[in-house]
Image (cartoon, grey):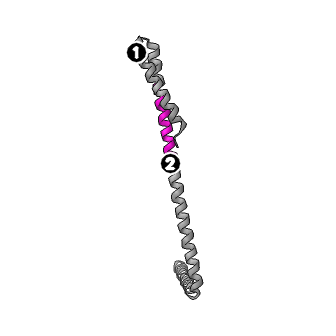
Amino acid sequence: MIDTDRITGAARELGGKVQGAVGDLTGSKSDSVEGRVREAVGQAENLYGHAKDAARHAADEAYEVAEDAYDQGRRYLREGHERSIEWPHASLLVAGLVGFGLGLLVNARRR
């Protein structure tokens, strides 16, 4: 989706170029200067539109990556839960070992 600032900026830039060229041909310095200013304003607005589009695109990409990471985490959690139901003794053994290891770490720090 193209930002409206890009469209209006391009239109102003083109209008400024035409006005500046007409001012140059007719010898009207005011039209020439006004056209160049209008062209510069159009370029700035066009660049602003490009920046907004780039930011929007980056936000969309970040959202998709976060959504994929969330789905993958949910899948891993579901698989872990299913395995803990299939192997309850192994789950208790792992939990016990983790608890024992934490107990050793806490006790070692007290000394």
Magenta residues, start to end: 39-55
Question: Label 1 is placed on what type of residue?
Answer: Asp
Q: Is residue 97 magenta?
A: no
Q: Nearer the viewer, residue 24 or 41?
A: 24
| Dominant secondary-structure state across the stretch colored magenta | helix
Q: Counting other residues with Cα less than 10 Å from the Cα at mark 1, is it few (<14), some (14-19), or many (20 or more)? A: some
Left or right relative to 100: residue 22? left
**Left or right: 56 in relation to 25:** right
Q: Which residue is mark 1?
A: 24
Residue 41 appears anywhere in the view: no
Q: Earlier in the sequence, mark 1 or mark 2?
A: 1
Q: Which residue is mark 2?
A: 57
Question: What residue sits 49% from the left and 50% below the top?
Answer: 58
Task: Residue 42: say if magenta.
Answer: yes
Q: Position of residue 75 (x, y in %)?
A: 55, 71
The amino acid pointed to by label 2 is His
